[in-house]
Amino acid sequence: EKGRPIIRSPSFWTSWSRPVSPTRGKGATYYSIAVVLDQLVEACFSDAKRIFPVSVPLEGEYGLKDVSLSVPCILGRDGAEKIIDLELSDEEKESLNKSAEALKQYLT
C-alpha cells in the first residue's frame, strides 16, 4: 500500500523560516539543516533513488564492520537502500579507518 502524500502546512514553513544556528559563532548554518532534512525526506517519500551522505552501519563496506559512519548511500522509499562503496586512495582509507576507530573507542 502506498503512503499518503506529504502536505506541508504554512505553519511548518513559518517555524523553519527563522534563522537557527546550531554552531553558534560560525553563522553559516541558518537554513541548511531544514533544507537538507527536506531533501532527505523528499527523497525517501518520492522513492527518488538520490545519493546522499548518511550515517549507516557498515557491514564490510570500506573494509569496516561494527561501526556507523556517514557514507554515500542511495535513498529511496526504504531509506538507505544501497551503500555506494567508492574507491578510496590509501590516504583516504587511513583517515576513514582512524575515524572508525575513534568512534568505536568513544562508544565502548
Image: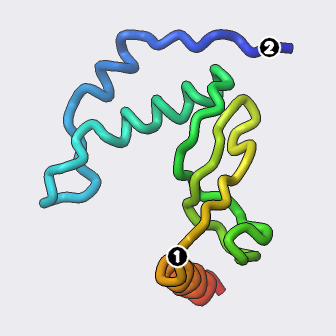
| Residue 15 occupies quadrant | top left
Q: Dot 1 surroundings within 10 Å: few (below 14), some, or many (20 or more)? A: few
**In whole angstroms, how far apart are the C-alphas of marks 2 and 1?**
42 Å
Looking at the image, residue 36 sits to the left or right of residue 96; the answer is left
* Secondary structure at numbered mark 2: loop
Q: Position of residue 1 (x, y in %)?
A: 86, 14
Asked if the residue under mark 1 is in contact with the one under mark 2, i.e. CB atoms within 8 Å, the reply is no
Which image quarter is the C terminus in? bottom right
Q: Position of residue 24 (x, y in %)?
A: 18, 58
| Residue 43 occupies quadrant | top right
Residue at the location (25% across, 26% down)?
Answer: 17
Q: Nearer the viewer, mark 2 or mark 1?
A: 1
Residue at the location (37% across, 35% down)?
Answer: 34
Looking at the image, residue 94 sits to the left or right of residue 107; the answer is left
Residue at the location (36% across, 42% down)?
Answer: 33
Give the amino acid at mark 2: Lys
Task: Say which residue label 1 marks.
Answer: 89
Looking at the image, residue 43 sits to the left or right of residue 35; the answer is right
Give the amino acid at mark 1: Ser
Residue 12 higher or lower than 69, as above or below = above
Residue at the location (21% across, 31% down)?
Answer: 18
* Secondary structure at numbered mark 1: loop
Is any atom of residue 103 visible in this view?
Answer: no
The mark that comes first in sequence, 2 or 1, is: 2
Q: Which mark is residue 2?
A: 2
